[in-house]
Image (spheres, rainbow, N blue to C red):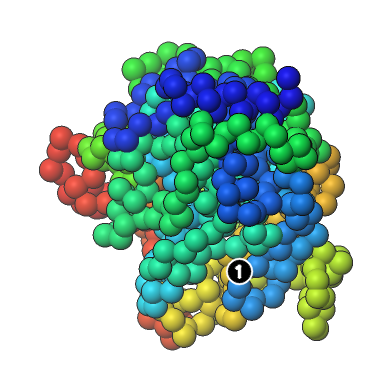
Amino acid sequence: MTLLTRVAALLTLCALAACGGGGDSAVTPPPPSAQNFLTTTDVERVIAQAVVEAQAVNAKATIAVVDRVGNVLAVFRMAGAGSTFTITSRTGAQGGLEGINILPPELAAISMAVTGAYLSSGGNAFSTRTASQIIQDHFNPEESNQPGGPLFGVQFSQLTCSDLIRHPSDGTVGPKPAPLGLAGEPGGLPLYKNGAVVGGIGVMATGIYSVDRDIIDNDTNLNEVIAVAGSRTFDAPAGVRADHINVDGRSLRFTDSGATPVSAAIAPSLATLGAVGSLVSVTGYGGSPIVAGVAWGTPASGVRPDTNPAFAGLDAYVLVDAANVNRYPPRAGNDGLLTAVEVTQILKSAITVANRARAQIRQPLGEPAQVSISVVDTHGAVLGLIRTPDAPLFGADVSLQKARTAALFSSLDAGSFLASRPAATYAATQALRTPVPSPPLMSVPIGSYVAAMRSFLAHSASLANGIAYGNRGVGNLARPFFPDGITGTAAGPLSVAAPNWSVFNVGLQLDLVFNAIVASVTSPSLISTDCVGGNRLANGMQIFPGSVPIYRGNLLVGAIGVSGDGIDQDDMVAFLGLANAGSALGTGIANAPPAIRNDGIVPGGEGTRLRYVNCPQAPFNGSNDQNVCSGI
């Protein structure tokens, strides 16, 4: 029986009985279950539904399906589908990834599918359209004089070169990479069964990989239309979709595009179409033959409950390798500045704060925050990583990026380390772009950002003077406007300036990993485990809030990074968790002394102070406590 014959039969069967299904209302996020995963039958159904819709709208699509930890379960390319796509913000910006147009559509579809899976959980369903809304230069996009999106910069995470991300040789354990990082092009959606995320679908039919610049209108995007159809019976519960979640008083977007529900009446036509398309095996990722997904929360997925007695009763989970061994158990720093006991207590105190905290981006209201927490030493080595069971998976890589960023920028040799990194070699990518930019793009020395920061802050010793940087402060300096979002002002020193800034050309964050990204997408079999070189930013840097450095007196000893249910919650879990750990231990570890924190910096002549952390109002469930970070 051919694939097309099988999927036609599956569509008919599923019309007569329950098949997968996300349901229509918000439910309490289910616990991890060995029953919740995508079977090969499920995957075939998703592909079939998407293909039927593509035919109905006269489109030729490439369709990818992944499981919750990013394993590629299938990639299907319809006959006549484009062989390449173009990366463009449609703003006229040049530089970064803008204009690259020789890559196969499978890479875009996989990135979109991974984004839908990784940004979602049992309490929130985010699509690539949601991602687009929260990564741009204003929140909301095109709304002048508003700060950047709350997840500004998250698109450059989950990279193939990350040392946290796993590769096909590691079996089914995740998290697996998104070839282009997280996507903002509409057409990526999460897939659900029994209220639990089990994967994602990504569709490339338009040949354009971009973002939604205007969220006020309802636009018809073919990628999204086809993905919506593909997700039928595995669609997200209505009550947890992004459009039921508010951030800073703004409603998030989930989809603009509807689709005709696939029915048994039209399914048989699929089996008679002959050369509809075929499965594609993507080098380094898979996609043919179809395989089943793995169950979330089991060792095979790479994420399982922690068995360390130190975290008993805290609902802690860990990342494990193919042998079911915890990849990041608490340990002492390679630099000898943090002990294993101290790392354990920092993680324990932070997850305790998270378990009390009121989540910002989850339904139903009043759920505890779900987060990933990383601790690193001064050289960026991972000393411990734990997470809560339903935290979106993207947060594992991002929490580590945040911790490493805070540790590096707070160090006395940050400037020299950055200046020693290889330049972003744009000149070597001219052949990837048509037409070739005029004048041709050149290489960008990483040291130019160090010089720009020292000039902007009017301090020749910046990045070598012992200032303690939290990620919120680093982010202030990495926005295309300073102060953040104020249209017409100068760019921060770590950012590209208008008109060339775009989500595909952000400045230092991308330029540090540019060479590694290009290498991985042009030679997908190339496996790298250090995006930057030198280990300290091995999975790249991050530029939105949620990390602080760790000190013993005036001595930097490491950093903690948190990513999960809202950036203010992330700040609080890191900052208050570290403070509570210091009180519990009495060994001298603490937050940075107030006198050296980056919120003491006021860039010359501007008058706007950098921010260090921002803790939420009334942050805890069952408590009226306010100003919980005050005085620390």
Crowd rating for badge 1 (residues with CA inside 10 Å; few <14, some 14–19, many 20+): many
Judging depth in this view, the residue of 74 and 405 nearest the camera is 74
Query: Does 469 appear above or below 288?
Result: below
Residue 364: give x, y in percent of width and height. Answer: 26, 37
Residue with the mark numbered 1: 89
Point out the residue furthest to the left here: 624
On the picture, is 164 further left or further right than 245? right
**Under tag 1, what secondary structure?**
loop
Residue at 49% across, 24% down: 14
Can see residue 628?
Answer: yes
Residue 239: give x, y in percent of width and height. Answer: 30, 40
Judging depth in this view, the residue of 376 and 96 nearest the camera is 96
Residue at 82% across, 64% down: 432
- Quarter of the picture containing the N terminus is top right
Q: Quadrant of residue 565?
A: top left
Residue 135: give x, y in percent of width and height. Answer: 49, 60
Query: Does 96 appear above or below 48?
Result: below
Judging depth in this view, the residue of 236 and 532 nearest the camera is 236
Residue at 64% across, 54% down: 59
Q: Quadrant of residue 515?
A: bottom right
Judging depth in this view, the residue of 99 and 451 nearest the camera is 99
Can see residue 286?
Answer: no
Residue at 43% across, 13% down: 309
Query: Does 308 appear above or below 502?
Result: above
On the picture, is 263 further left or further right than 609? right
On the picture, is 155 further left or further right than 583? right
Count of residue discs: 1
Residue 361: give x, y in percent of width and height. Answer: 34, 45
Q: Which kind of residue does numbered mark 1 sit on?
A: Ser
